[in-house]
Image (cartoon, grey):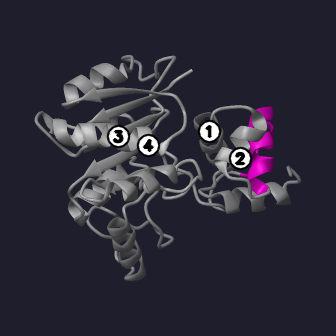
Amino acid sequence: MAVKVLILEDNPVARSFLCRVVRESFSDTLLVTEAGNLETARRHVGQRVDGQSPADPFKLILVDLELPDGNGVELLAELALYPATKIVTTLYSDDDHLFPALQCGADGYLLKEDRFEVLVEELQKIVRGQPPLSPAIARRLLTHFRQGSAGPGMPHDQSGGMANHAAPLSGLQSSRPIPLGRGAPLDHERLTPRESEVLTYLSKGFTIKEIANLMGIKWFTVNDHIKSIYRKLNVSSRAEAAVLASKQGLV
């Protein structure tokens, strides 16, 4: 079955460029859908009124920020519970665009001005379980947190960390789990057999693509299992998941 990808970009030239980047980045059979505005993107996504996702959702969504009928951040907020990896693709690298996008659920942030090869390499990080971030954005985030600043619209919680609604930069989850030690105790009975198997492979250091090959499933499916594991274990990285699983005797 083809992996569904949605590209929201109003500029036809940029949209064609991003299509080529996506097709070059993944070996899977892809079904790429293009949208030039928010209204079209919403129609393609096709969420029901009750907020439930369709049976065959998009697995990867690229979102431009400045659009003819609004801002891509609006779509990110609407898709907070949508089971897709959501990546911002934009020309804006400033804090006023970066942090609101991450807060609203962006799993990565890429600059369209980067070279074709750079964008391909960054998107391929999804398969390895790493967040796709343009080099300039990664440096900006490092500088931001090293300075201990909360940044525009990025409040700290009482423990000094980022507020829980900020997007994580590990595991490409679309909503931030509660950091290790702050949430409810682990209830490993909630893990499905497939999730337990994925967790075992994660603990042994296998990449998402390697796990997919070992289990005979798509890497996007593995990514979905990892999101669920992180949510259930209240962790935000494979290292935390491995440590907690080891303590609980799950691996």
Element class at badge 2: helix
For residue 44, above or below residue 164: above
In the figure, 144 relative to 196: above or below? below
Describe residue 127's horizontal placement relative to residue 240 as left or right. left
Q: Secondary structure at mark 4?
A: helix
The span picked out in magenta is 185-203
* First in residue order: circle 1 vs circle 3: 3
Distance of label 1 from label 3 (alpha carbons) = 20 Å
| Earlier sequence position, callout 2 versus callout 4 | 4
Q: CA distance from mark 3 to mark 2?
A: 25 Å
- Please name which of the two marks, 2 or 4, marks the residue nearer to the observer: 4
- Cα distance, mark 1 to mark 2? 9 Å
Is residue 68 shown to the viewer in this render?
Answer: yes
Q: Return the residue found at the far left.
A: 68
Q: Spatial distance from mark 2 to mark 4, Cα to Cα?
A: 19 Å
CB-based contact (under 8 Å), mark 1 and mark 3:
no
User: Which residue is tagged 3?
Assistant: 20
| Three-letter amino acid code of the residue under disc 2 | Glu
Residue where numbered disc 4 is placed: 24
Q: Which residue is mark 1?
A: 219
- Does the stretch in magenta take in 198? yes
Q: Earlier in the sequence, mark 1 or mark 4?
A: 4
| Residue 179 location (% of width, % of height) | 59, 60
